[in-house]
Structure formats: structure tokens, C-alpha cells
Amino acid sequence: MSMNHNQEIRLASRPVGMPTRENFAFVDVDLPVANDGQVLLKTMYISVDPYMRGRMNDVKSYVPPFQLDHVMDGDVIAEVVESRHSEYATGDIVAGHLPWRLYGVSDGHGLRKLNPAQGPVTAALSVLGITGITAYFGLFDIGQPKPGETVVVSGAAGAVGTVVGQIAKLCGCRVVGIAGSDEKTSYLTDELGFDGAINYHTQNVGLALKEVCPQGVDVYFDNVGGEVTDAVLMRINDGARIAMCGQIALYNATKAEMGPRLLAQLVVHRALMKGFIVSDYAPRFSEAIKRLATWVANGNIKYRESVIEGFNRVPEAFLGLFRGDNIGKQLVKVAQSE
Amino acid sequence: MSMNHNQEIRLASRPVGMPTRENFAFVDVDLPVANDGQVLLKTMYISVDPYMRGRMNDVKSYVPPFQLDHVMDGDVIAEVVESRHSEYATGDIVAGHLPWRLYGVSDGHGLRKLNPAQGPVTAALSVLGITGITAYFGLFDIGQPKPGETVVVSGAAGAVGTVVGQIAKLCGCRVVGIAGSDEKTSYLTDELGFDGAINYHTQNVGLALKEVCPQGVDVYFDNVGGEVTDAVLMRINDGARIAMCGQIALYNATKAEMGPRLLAQLVVHRALMKGFIVSDYAPRFSEAIKRLATWVANGNIKYRESVIEGFNRVPEAFLGLFRGDNIGKQLVKVAQSE
């Protein structure tokens, strides 16, 4: 790919239900020029995340929707290939919320320099990035796990769930993950040290929870919603805390899905359920990154990234999230460092 | 009714769905004898409450179930008609959790003396009793209303809802009640000072909320559940607090009712939903009673009681709760003070 070729990914149409490749358009654009105070960035890695599905709808929410026929954006790692900015040098690797373009310019606002000597830079999009930080605040601020308690996490093999479970283990909890394949459940128990794991595709989640959480559920970290969450709600203990992080099972619904009314469980068990958005914790991100980095350096937290190569495969990587293709963080590798 | 006639109400059978008169049995029993350290009590008022429906099922919950063919019980006001207890005198009026009997004995455990000079003793079963205390803790501890916020309460004309709304007004909130008749909505706005009221039987609750809560909903105090709660959830603001007190719409369901899956609203709006049981606040009851009594004495909180006369009509009063017969607290008057 020569440096005089530039391309961006635009929202071509808004999906109804499950998105398709046709909702994305690849458009050739001019190579931008870095002016004084700017850097020219070459995109290296792009993060695809379930929350982006919400941005494809024309609905006001906590993140503004993608605009039709405009470039999409998200968390990206890029290399500075030309600098006219005093704080950046050619060759610097940075992370930031950036457009999905092969090359772009930035005035440095919102960029964070990464140090490749401290470990793989991709960690800034995974365990030391938004998904790791999400796990950290949702579990500590809402879940408030105590030693000996049982913590259940759905979407357990994903970027957030894997970190949630491992932090809960560090807190002295019994940890059970719910995931969608035997490969994933084995990963959770054999590699990450979860006490138990349930494959919701092949097991009755309610019966399995009864067996693997004989003391009930004290903390539930929910990435999924739907029937998996129904089953967990039926097993909560008095005083349970439920951190509502995501509802990926419902993101592609074309109308409100129906399910059993189970909120009386919250009354009977005096349970707390709270939704959260990680960006609300922005002033405390450095606290989370510091602790996560220490755990990663000590080997207390392991992480995996599912990497697909090629800018043209961003849509494919994104769509795979809803099939549960990924273990750990799903990334797209766009280019090497130069 | 002569004092040598005694009778009690037993659970004759467990209801499936809506309870009926046949689930209750009136059984003649011996007049008990007060031994040393005991008082003989004559029942004056019986409180019937929605939560008792749960006790008619054979299901472990926060209050033990009623036992088949055993006497039922609840909050009662009684008169001491004979005392062999040093702390009680004949003629004392007491409140306590007692069996549904015309006459019973007690060793004084759990009894609270009432002072008829301070106002109607029935207040101990309503605004200064469990329902008022429930309103107090649910609203303050979970709802945490702030001046200028919008507070919505369902079951608004009931014993709990009327107190919730009036306390919220004292906190400087805009208060909207949802209730089941025009008589009730008029009572809320015209007599209790609610800013708005919605009749869920005749109005589209979602549309009505949009009109009467133009700034959205910051606090929701839920006594009802079901479709009313669905509609409120669609109007919550960021950071909303939802106190789950009861789900009367669902208490007589014979299987889990189905409804739209709306928990994503909690995520998008970082909302908190928490169930509670008033007995968990028992160590703080006196705080609530003191403040409620002051508000009642000052005329800041008004209350109404729906009183049915006759021990034989306890089942009828109870069943009426599920038809929404009552405004304010539903009581049964069993006997006069002697």
C-alpha cells in the first residue's frame, strides 16, 4: 500500500437488524497534509466494539450516532509518519479516538503516546484500553466483590469479560463465566483460572448455574442480556449487585424482544442493578490503567487478542462480534510500523 | 360480639392466580387465658397489604409463607382487655405483628404502645406504620430526590404511593403519580398537591408521561411493575434512580408474564434500579416515624384510610387491593375500644 493511496470507511446505510457488509462504504480520499502543529498518522490497528452497533442507528444516545456518508471512527493505534508538532516525532506510536482512515492528520488532541518497550502496543486497545477499564470500573464500583462471594460474568470470553473474571479472582471470589463455545469455556477455566464456565449454546444455563454456583450469585456482570440474564436473575442472592455493561444479545433486535418479567427478583432479594458507561469514569482512567498494567506485568491478568488483518476487513471483524467469533479483544491490523 | 366468642382466620388453601374468599377459613377457637406476664388482647384494626399475597404461596421469601390450616397474621392494632404484665394496663392500645384473631394473648414482645391523645391510632398501621416507613426509606435511600427533579410514583394513590409523592414534594421535586381511576388522580392533584397524575386505565401512560414529565424522569418509585413500569423506563433520564418496592401487577400471575426487554435503558442512562424490603431498615424505623409524625402534625403530609368494618370482611378487604379498591391504606375495623 503506497503512501499516496488513502481510503476511509463510511456509513453507507443504517442497518435494520443485523448489520451487513453493505452498510459500510470504502471511499478513496486525498492523502492529507500535516500543517504546522499537526502530525500525519498512519493507522496501525483499529478496535471494533459492540457499542458501535448503537451508533449505526439514528438515535441519540451516550455517544453520538455515526452520520450517513461520513467517515466512521473509534479507538485506533497509529504511527506518526510525519510531524510538524513539537511534542511528537516521526515513529511515535499513539492511541486515540480517530477516524477509520488509512492516513489522517491530528493536532494531537486526545492522543496518548505508547511505549513499545513496555509491551505490545495493542494492549492500549484491549486490556489497558477501554475494555479493560470498563471491566475495572463496572466490577469495582457496581459489583463491589468481596472475598468468598460468587461472581458470574456473561460474555465471559470477550475483551471485557475476561478481565472482569480475572480481577474477581484476584479479589478472592468464586468466578463463573458464561460464553458461547467449548473453546471459550475451556479458555476461561484452563487458561484464566475461572472456577467454572457455562456454554449457553449447549447447556441449560439455569440448571448449570445451580450446579456451578451452589451458593447462588452475589455479583453479576452482564455484557449480554436476554435469556442468559434471565437465568442468572433467578439465582441471585439477597443483596446481589448487577453491573449492566452491555446487552449484545439485543443490539440487533428490530423491535423490543419479549422476555419474562423478572424484576420482582430485585425486590425479593433487595438487589441492585446499575447500568454504566465507561466514559463517565474518564477522570479516573489513569487509576485503572495503572492497576491493570501492574496486574498484566505480574502475570495476574492474562489477555488474548483476536486479530484480523486488512483495512478492508474491518466490517467483517465488526460483524463477527455478534456471532461471537472473538476470544478476547477483536482488533484489525491495518499496517505495520514503518 | 361477646367476649366468650373467639375466632381466627386460617389459610384454607393456596391460591392459584387471583385469591378468592375460599382460600380463607374462619374457625371458632377457645378464648385464650392471659397467664402471668401476659396480656389479653382484643383486635381493633387489621392491616391488609399486597405483600401478603406472596405469603399465600409455598415459596421461601423474605417473609415466611403462611402455613396451610394455620392462623394468618399481620400488622394489627389491639386493646389490652386484661393485663398480667407489669408494663401494660387494661385499656392500653397497642400495635404489633399479631395473628388474625378476635382475641389473643401476648407476652408483650414486639408490641408498641400507642397514645390516642396524639391522633388517630390507625395511623400506626398507615402513615406512621409500615407503609409510611416504606415510602420514607425507599424514596430517600434509593430515590435520593433532589430539588427540581421529576419523581414518578406508581400505585400513587395507595398507602405507600401517597406518602412517597408528598415527601417528594417536600423535597422540592416535580411529582407525578400513576393510578387506576379518575377519583384517585383527582385526589392526588387536588388534595395531595401532586403536579400531575395519570390514569393508566384510560390513558396511554407513555404519551401521558411525555406530556406531564417534559424533562424526563429522575426518580421512579415502583409499586406496580408490568406495563406501567415499561412506560416509565422509556422516559428515564441519565442517572435515574428506580426504587423497586412492589410489583402488584404481577403478584397473581400463574406463570412469568412476558414483557419487552428494556434493561438496555439502564445501560444507556446509567440508571440504578434497586429492590428493597422495609424490614431491612428496622434499626432506623424510629427515625422515619419521628419525621413522618412531624410532617403529619404540621399538615405537610395528609393521609386517608379506606376502612371496611367487620372481621368477616378481612378477605374482601384483602382481595380489593388487587382491584385497586382502596385510596390510601386499606384497614379492617374489627372492634371498638371498650
Image (cartoon, coloured by chain):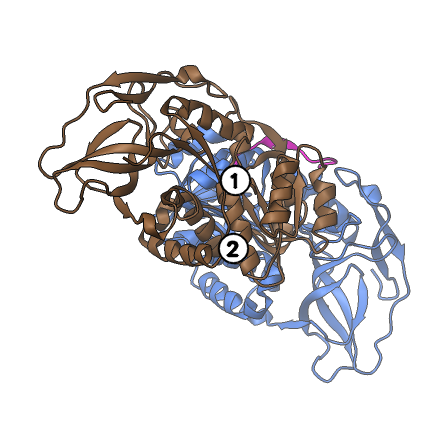
Chain colours: A blue, B brown
**Is B154 left, or right, of A318 in this rendering?**
left
Front-lying residue, A182 or B75: B75
Q: State the residue at coordinates (43%, 55%).
A: B292
Query: Dividing the image into 4 quarters, which one contains the C terminus of chain B?
Result: top left
Q: Secondary structure at mark 1?
A: loop
Tag 1 near tag 2, CB within 8 Å:
no
Q: Which kind of residue does numbered mark 1 sit on?
A: Gly
Q: Quadrant of residue A22?
A: top right
Residue B240 picture quarter: bottom right
> Chain ID for label 1?
B
The single residue placed furthest to the left in the displayed view is B36
Mark 2 highlights which residue?
A: B167
Q: Position of residue A166 (x, y in %)?
A: 45, 52
Image: magenta residue range: A253-262
The answer to whether residue B331 is magenta is no
Task: Identify the residue at horizontal 69%, vertical 66% (top origin).
Answer: A96
Q: Is residue B238 above or below residue A19?
A: below
For residue B158, the mark is: 1
